[in-house]
Image: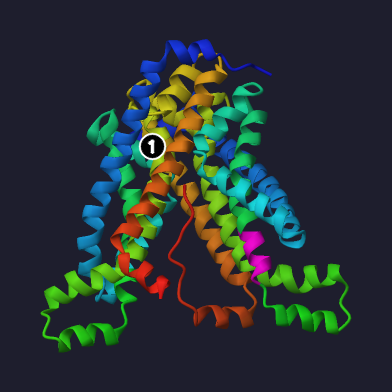
Amino acid sequence: MSPAGIWDAFNDPNLDGWHQLWIHVRLSLEALVLATVIGVTLGVVAAKTGRVTGFVVSAVANLGRTIPTFALLALAVALSTIGEGPTLVGLVALGVPPVLLNAHTGIREVDRGAVEAARGMGFTPLAVLGRVELPMALPLVFTGIRVSAIQIVATAALGASVGANGLGVLILSGLANADDEILLAGAIPTALLALAVGGMLALAERLLTPRGLRLARASRPTKTMRSTT
Amino acid sequence: MPEIRWDWIERHTDDIVRATVAHLEITAVSVVAAVAIAIPLGILVRGRRVAFAGAAGTADVLYTIPSIALFSFLVPFTGIGNLPAVIGLIAYALTMLIRNTVVGLRSVPAAVREAAAGMGLTPRQILLRVELPLAVPSIMAGVRLATVSTVGIATIAVFVGGDGLGELILLDGIQRQLFLTPILVGTVLATALAIVLDALLVLAERLLTPWTRARAAL
């Protein structure tokens, strides 16, 4: 096993690491965009409608987060068929809960005074949501998106076991053939992709936090809890 | 829509029980080992800004690495089986536990520490009798989080030749023409295991911190 051997395995035309990397990125991105749209929408609905709806939606999302991501992927595929489409459904299903829960909490925790002030200035309910509540909830929403993204990239690698392409194809091939070079030619890019995605979204989170909130946030203690993988 | 085959469950009760027990063992070994490492390490780095920043930074990077990739990095050294999975799971649990241990220890009010010192307690006694007990809620929050996520990630051990409920999902389900029943059984048991262990840990925390209830009763 050598770095050159791993690089050669990644470039092997039969394994085609670059192509699998591209599929992995595309599949993850599609899942993340869909999960974000669904998660934010449901989170807003949960925060805006009655107490009961909010409770039910967040309870279901919490349960969804407890189900192992690999199990969700397997279920999505078993209920339809193997391939990329059902894999995408599974990835969206596991990506929704973190975004939903953070959007729900983010909007509910918006300072009531700010909302009242906007109303007093004659903002319509939609304008209050779009120009006050969502921007103030944005940092927390982005934390949810980052958690989802990391989980989607990780679980997309397992998609290889249910007929989807992606870097997992190299990992599973390496494991099946007891070939460490092929194994690492899949595992190293998977880890780097997750780190790159996590890093980029952490940066976006920081840049998108309104300056006023950044100051308020800096004076607050850090949260100790993190979501599950 | 494929139906649930109850007869398969009946015929494979032994396998299901074996996989569940194996899953529980992998989870227990990983979490207990992580707690045994995290608490002394947390005590060691709590007062050192650079050491804690280093430990927290390493933990963040580790936490982001997908489990299948982390397990795969270990396979060339450990071979396949439960070992690469357990080492990986310990690493993940550590990332959650170290931070919570340090945060818990740091949140002990200085006045409490001074009062203990004023009463003549040695630094060692202060740590064991005052600081650690007061850090229990924060540490237990980390243990609960680590346990629930370990139950989930342990389903991936099967990919590197490990045991557990992942066997039902991957070997009996996906690799046998997407047989729904074992996938469903594995999913339900893994989720139930996470919920039950979390509830037991809530109970354990209540037993470990009787003073929080005494205060509530006043």
Q: Front-most of A101 and B41? A: A101
The residue beneath circle 1 is: B154
Query: Residue B204, percent across and down?
Result: 33, 53
Question: Which chain letter goes with mark 1?
Answer: B
| Left-right relation of A191 to B80 | right
> Any magenta on residue A13?
no
Q: Quadrant of residue B122?
A: bottom left
Query: Residue B173, percent across and down?
Result: 50, 19
Q: Front-most of B14 and A187? A: B14
Q: Front-most of A45 and B178? A: A45
Residue drawn at the location 62% of the way across and 73% of the way down? A209
Quadrant containing the C terminus of chain B is: bottom left
Residue range highlighted in magenta? A102-109
* SS at badge 1: helix
**Vertical arrangement, residue B54 with respect to residue B18, above or below:** below
Query: Residue A161, percent across and down?
Result: 50, 25
Residue drawn at the location 65% of the way across and 77% of the way down? A210
